[in-house]
Image (cartoon, helix red, strand yellow):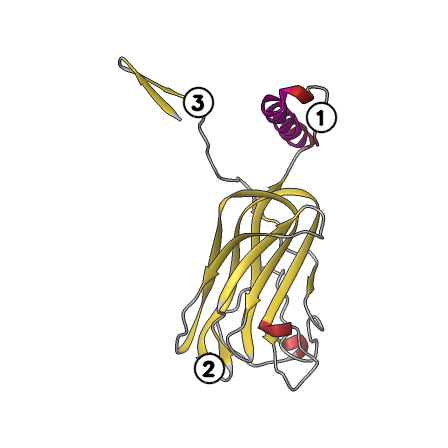
Amino acid sequence: ATFYNTGFLWCDEISAYGVEGGNIALNKDYTVSGVGERKDSYCAKLNDGIASDKLEYSKGEASTWFGFYYHTAYTDINAPNSLGTVTYDFEKLHTIDKVRVHTLFGNTSGIKSPKYISVETSEDGVTYTEAAKQTYSPSSGSDIKWAEIALQKPVDARFVRVCVMLDGTFAFINEIEIYGEEKSQKDIAQQRYIKTESYLREHPQRGSQVVG
């Protein structure tokens, strides 16, 4: 809120959003939905810092692309109901503010642009909340580029799930970057203190109750 008073400007809150963190997904293990990585197919690593700009169809260890796959006639799929996910467990709370996914856009050889890419976060690995979502229109040809999914504001999470909704049989990606930094115990304690103070102001009759 802002108040004006005879030449003075008064405000009661200023918020600044941003995290001075790097790519915390680099070399970090992850899990893939469905049957997982499909190691005999398109299974490029998503955490090795390599984002190929060439469309190649090598499979297995020679893969330069990771393929999410869905087909009603088969069971060896890693995108059940056309939704493929990659989930990271960072083991401790981190403040996350941006995700990038190196993606093949277009329509070629059964590979289409994703309908959308979204980011879900969780502190316990059970309950996930959508933190950001970017939708895409169908296109032709092939266009390889980074899909930038910026969160409206930083989110504290231990688990981060990147969701790719297919618009065909395949969606191709080959690198995921997640930007953030680990929360210190001091930050966590301060956040809990602020939550407690806010709760007690709203519920003064429960002055002896402390929330976590």
Q: Residue at x 52, y 69 (%)?
A: 52
Q: Earlier in the sequence, mark 3 or mark 2?
A: 3
User: How far apart in space, not on screen, are marks 1 and 3 (Cα)?
Assistant: 25 Å
Name the residue type under label 2.
Answer: Thr
Assess whether residue 203 is covered by the magenta stretch.
Answer: yes
Between label 3 and label 2, give the one nearer the viewer.
Answer: 3
Q: Residue at x 61, y 73 (%)?
A: 81
Residues 46 and 49: in front is: 46
Q: Is residue 146 left or right of residue 86?
A: left
Label 2: state its secondary structure.
strand
Name the residue type under label 3.
Answer: Asp
Direction front: furthest residue: 205
User: Is the residue marked by circle 2 packed among few (<14), some (14-19), or many (20+) residues within 10 Å?
Assistant: some
Q: Which residue is mark 2?
A: 108
Direction left: furthest residue: 7
Residues 183 and 7: in front is: 7
Q: Which quadrant of the figure contains the N terminus?
A: top left
User: How far apart in space, not on screen, are marks 2 and 1 (Cα)?
Assistant: 57 Å
Q: Which residue is mark 3?
A: 12
User: Is the residue marked by circle 1 packed among few (<14), some (14-19), or many (20+) residues within 10 Å?
Assistant: few
**Magenta stretch, overall SS:** helix
**Residue range highlighted in magenta:** 187-204
